[in-house]
Amino acid sequence: MQPSMKMIQQMQNRLAKIQQELEETEIEGSAGGGAVKVIVNGQREFRSISIDPDFVDPDDVEMLEETVAAAITDAMTRAQKLSEEKMGALTGGMKIPGLGF
């Protein structure tokens, strides 16, 4: 069954709406019991980071670096999952090359 132009246009419109929603959605990742928080959007673009000053130990920079990396990974994983959920709803779970998920 060939998709009609109307169906293709509707899908393109829904895709554009989902992409806009993902761009506007903020997702928080955290590590260190919430001492490090990272915000990304649903398209996995970095927005901000906050670090509890009490968590910072100048004698253990490596721990801070690892915690920041863990918070970033957490945020990116959550953003990827959200993107897959939203795009999967559009495509019925099919992976379509070029949609970025």
Image (cartoon, grey):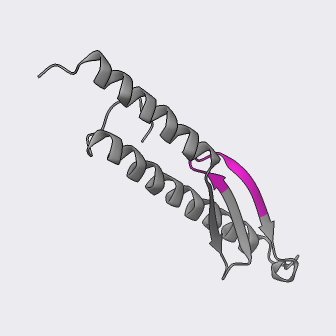
Residue 43 in sight: no
**Residue at 37% across / 28% down in the picture?**
10
Position of residue 2 measured from the top left corner of the image (x, y, whole percent): 16, 19
- Choose between 93 and 55: the one closer to the eye: 93
Position of residue 19 measured from the top left corner of the image (x, y, whole percent): 52, 38
Position of residue 84 measured from the top left corner of the image (x, y, whole percent): 40, 49
- Choose between 45 and 5: the one closer to the eye: 5
Q: Relative to 31, does residue 72 appear above or below in the rendering?
A: above
Q: Quadrant of the C terminus?
A: top left
Q: Which residue is farthest top? A: 5
Q: Relative to 79, does residue 29 appear above or below in the rendering?
A: below
Left or right: 60 with respect to 38?
right
Q: Which residue is farthest left? A: 1
Residue 53 in sight: yes
Position of residue 33 measured from the top left corner of the image (x, y, whole percent): 66, 83
Q: Quadrant of the N terminus?
A: top left
Q: Relative to 76, does residue 9 appear above or below in the rendering?
A: above
Q: Quadrant for residue 23, please give it.
A: top right
Q: Which residue is farthest front? A: 6
- Tag count in the figure? 0
Q: Quadrant for residue 6, please give it.
A: top left
- Choose between 39 and 31: the one closer to the eye: 39
**Residue at 56% across / 49% down in the picture?**
42
Q: Relative to 23, does residue 63 appear above or below in the rendering?
A: below
**Residue at 33% across / 46% down in the picture?**
88
Left or right: 31 with respect to 5?
right
What is the chief secondary structure element of the magenta stretch? Answer: strand
Residues in magenta, as a range: 40-49
Left or right: 37 with respect to 21?
right
Q: Quadrant for residue 31, please give it.
A: bottom right
Instruction: Tell whether position 82 is magenta.
Output: no
